[in-house]
Amino acid sequence: MSPNKNDIYIVGAARTQFGRFDGEDNDLAEEAVRGALADCDLSWTDIAFAVGGTNGETKPDNLVSRLGLTGLPFVTVKNGCATGAVALMTARNGMVAENLDLACVVGYDNHARGAFNVSPARYGLGDWYGATGMMVTTSYFALKIQRYLYEHGIDERTLGYASAKAFAYAKDHPYAWRRKPVSVDETLDADMINDPLTRLMFCSPDAGAAALILARGSRAFDLCDTPIRLASVALRGRRPGSFEVFSPWLSPGDRTSPSIDAAKAAFDAAVITPADVQVAQLQDTDSGAEVIHLGETGLITHGDQEAAYRNGDFEIDGRLPVNTDGGLLANGEPVGASGLRQVHEIVRQLQGRADGKQVPGTPRIGFTHVYGAPGISACTVLIKEGAQP
Amino acid sequence: MSIEVVDATLFTSLDPVTLAGSACRACGSHVFPAIESCPTCSSVDVERVALPTEGTVWSWTTQHFAPKPPFKTDEFIPFSIGYIDLGPVIVQGWLVGKNEWVIGEPVHLVLTHAWTQDSGAVCTFGFEVV
């Protein structure tokens, strides 16, 4: 095949170990960037455009002080849990708009222990909202899955299947954080945090970085034996009827979701349907989030999740392997890195060189999905194409 | 004696207790707490209204660990939070009186003790079984 001039490919990818980290945030970011460059035998001096994302206090664009003062334009993004995917989208848009052949995307964070602590004022809310204990992310996840289970007649045991699957994948993944397998019953019997979610059903903020090298058009095939085409990337925000974190009120009536809208936009732009996806990454901030996002992205019909988990559909040899690196549940969530970790895993799976369990056969089509505050989602479709003649 | 509450702007009245929302004159959408514009249609033609005081549990959870500050409490004990369907709007609030709930359960608005400070007891709104 002959690529179009403005087709964007991932030719290099790298991630760090996720978990607790004592060094500087920039140590993580530099390790990921240098790893991604090495993955495709490039040097920082080859890169024409860079985009970096973090939700921490450091400035991604200052990474040039370590990587090289080449004068390149370096854009910083900060979009919560969607930061990594938005950085990727920004890089693609910049390459196409400005005719740039090589770009680097990096995301990283190094969070303190425990649930995120945020101020009501940052979300335009009064002090009363935090003072009365309503501004708690874990209770939001619980309230959302409680309603979803009710609306779709799904048993709570499904939440245990999702967690047990994540830790089983992570056991074989060298870069995952929580790699001790747990049984479905252990996840259900763990300490209750917010009904119906137990301690083993939440991801935790932690540290990590991931980076990608993008190449435009035929250049990609000079740099990489199996470049993976970024067939689409779509970002959407919330509409009336969505159920978002830190919401003192919700609209009655039909439920909407930025995940539904972003997934549809990504599938449409790539000219595929959800049924074409062979390996997927979904935002599993908690096990309930994976259950919900399977439905919202269209990968499964709402209400069919329980039977699908029981049937092993999301296992490595199942119909649709999901979160094959252990997802957020086992990797934690360094917010800026998380979306790029997803892309890294899909790229490795499509190239047939997964770090952990490899999807059997020759999967060609992958999908990623991030979702977070204040009601945004970004999805990508990634496709492996035949070698260039 | 006057009642001290977490934020007086949340209420149109404290006795009987009634929550203050806003209603859009253009599209009819209701919001809580009251704001100056409509997030559904972007209109700024909104009015402050008293919200219904009875509804049903739309979703619920029980908070089993003490939230970090700025959460305030005299002594932490697990408490329930829910979304309550009041008809024109679904409102987030405390569910008081028990820690196990059923979606669809009828509840009504009450004032309930939140914490004690130097000037005395502070109340917030909550919902309890009818």
Image (cartoon, coloured by chain):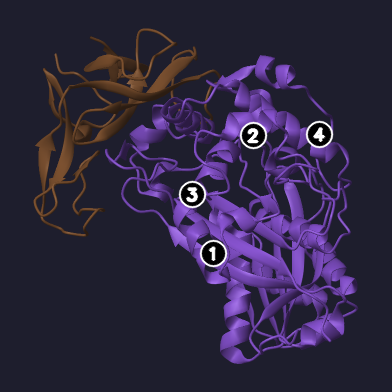
Chain colours: A purple, B brown
* A224 horizontally vs B35: left or right: right
- Residue A196 drawn above or below residue B130: below
| Label at residue A266 | 1
User: Where residue A56 sits in the image (x, y, percent)?
Assistant: 63, 55
Q: Are marks 2 and 4 in contact (CB under 8 Å)?
A: no
Asked if residue B121 can be seen in this view, the reply is no
Q: Which quadrant, please, contains the N terminus of chain A?
A: bottom right
Q: Horizontal and vertical percent for residue A142?
A: 50, 29
Q: Callout 3, which amino acid?
A: Ala
Q: Quadrant of residue A24?
A: bottom right
Q: Residues within 10 Å of mark 3 (few under 14, many from 20)?
A: some
In this rendered view, identify the residue nearer to me: A52 or A239.
A239
Q: Which residue lies under the disc numbered 2?
A: A308
Q: Residues within 10 Å of mark 4 (few under 14, many from 20)?
A: many
Q: Do marks 2 and 4 share a chain?
A: yes
- Classify mark 3: helix, strand or loop: loop
Disc 2 versus disc 4: nearer the observer = 2
Which one is nearer the viewer's eye here, A192 or A306? A306
Which badge, 4 or 1, comes first in the chain's sequence?
4
From the image, tell me which residue sits under label 4.
Answer: A168
Sequence-earlier tag: 1 or 3: 1
Would you place residue A104 above or below residue A99 in this image? above
Tags 1 and 2 touching, CB below 8 Å = no
Regarding mark 2 in the picture, which secondary structure is present there?
A: helix
Q: CA distance from mark 1 to mark 3?
A: 20 Å
Q: Which residue is mark 3?
A: A373
What's the distance in space between the residues labelled 2 and 3, CA to CA?
A: 28 Å
